[in-house]
Image (cartoon, rainbow, N blue to C red):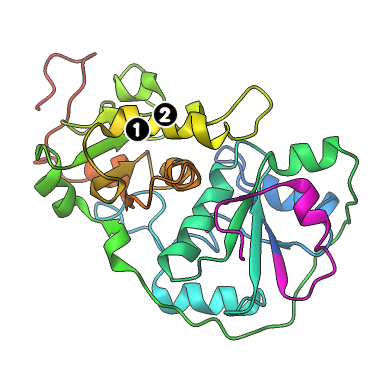
Amino acid sequence: MPYTTLITTVELSEHLNDPDWAVVDCRFSLDDTAQGRRDYRQAHIPGAVYAHLDEDLSGPIIPGQTGRHPLPDVETAARTFSNWGIDDSVQVVVYDGGNSSMAARLWDMLRWLGHPAVAVLDGGWARWQGEGRPARSGVERRSPRYFTPRPRLELLLDAAGVEAIRTDPAWRLFDSRSGESYRGEKLGYDPIAGHIPGAISAPYADNLGPDGCFLPPEQLHARFEALLGDVSAEQAVFYCGSGVTAAHNLLALAHAGLGEARLYVGSWSDWITDPARPISNPSDPSSKS
């Protein structure tokens, strides 16, 4: 059976020399976009290839029309995955150096393109390194394979789709950013603070325990069951600042066994490109909701 949500360091260590397993290092810093690649070249899990959020996991930004990290088009993503040696027979394992949010982005991309055999390394690089497991320096490549995309368009929503469901009681819209960002107390990387009216705060960081690993499935189940109420996961939509960290909630929800939710890829950075769209900012009484 393939791994489709999380995988442990022990489980990955048993497959490091398996040619049908591909490991992808997704370390990245929004404040220093070259840091992840430098860290990868210095030390990474043996056999891992490197994925850069801006260059490999995002498409071109169109000012005033997209958020900060739009998805690449299907053909471009398929070409990237082919170059990383991923085809239908490959189990993919992804990790990063932080809270697994960057790794979750790649997990969600592969899910979107119909490749369910992808799992995030629970605890990421920090846990792997902390356990004294093997590492390698330099740049690695895998022999190319042919990735066949099977887009699952039902997993994505755009701004129009969000507008259509955000006040519908049959749906739930969740903001995956911190509570401070949701309440408009923290500006972050975007020029306007606040949240989409109707959205419920669901910080993705609450999926993790003090050790940096995901909470046990039963705890995640209880968390999301309380958030969803009487709505199924399929009727839930998650967003964040730019469509990256919201995938962390999608991953946790799936690991909890509650099903597959949807992603508003453009997220807050896309929503605010149109001044006609309503915003809610409790910190600013003049905001239009």
Q: Residues within 10 Å of mark 1 (few under 14, many from 20)?
A: some
Numbered badge on residue 222:
2
How many numbered circles does the render carry?
Answer: 2
Residue at 58%, 73% (x, y): give it: 81
Q: Residues within 10 Å of mark 2 (few under 14, many from 20)?
A: few
Under circle 2, the secondary element is: helix
Under circle 1, the secondary element is: helix
162 on left or right of 96: left
Q: Is residue 126 above or below residue 158?
A: above
Quarter occupied by residue 242: top left
In the image, residue 182 lies in the stretch drawn in magenta: no
Nearer to me, 136 or 124: 124
Q: Looking at the figure, which quarter contains the N terminus? A: bottom right
Residue at 53%, 57% (x, y): give it: 106
Q: Looking at the figure, which quarter contains the C terminus? A: top left
Which residue type carries mark 1? Glu
Quarter occupied by residue 169: top left
Label 1–label 2 contact, CB within 8 A: yes
69 on left or right of 100: left
Q: Position of residue 276 (x, y in %)?
A: 8, 41
Numbered badge on residue 225:
1
Q: Position of residue 220 (x, y in %)?
A: 48, 33
Numbered badge on residue 160:
none
255 on left or right of 277: right
Q: Which residues are magenta?
A: 1-22
Q: Position of residue 64 (x, y in %)?
A: 25, 51
Which residue type carries mark 2? Ala
Nearer to me, 15 or 61: 15
Residue at 40%, 61% (x, y): give it: 71
Q: Is residue 177 visible?
A: no
Nearer to me, 112 or 189: 112
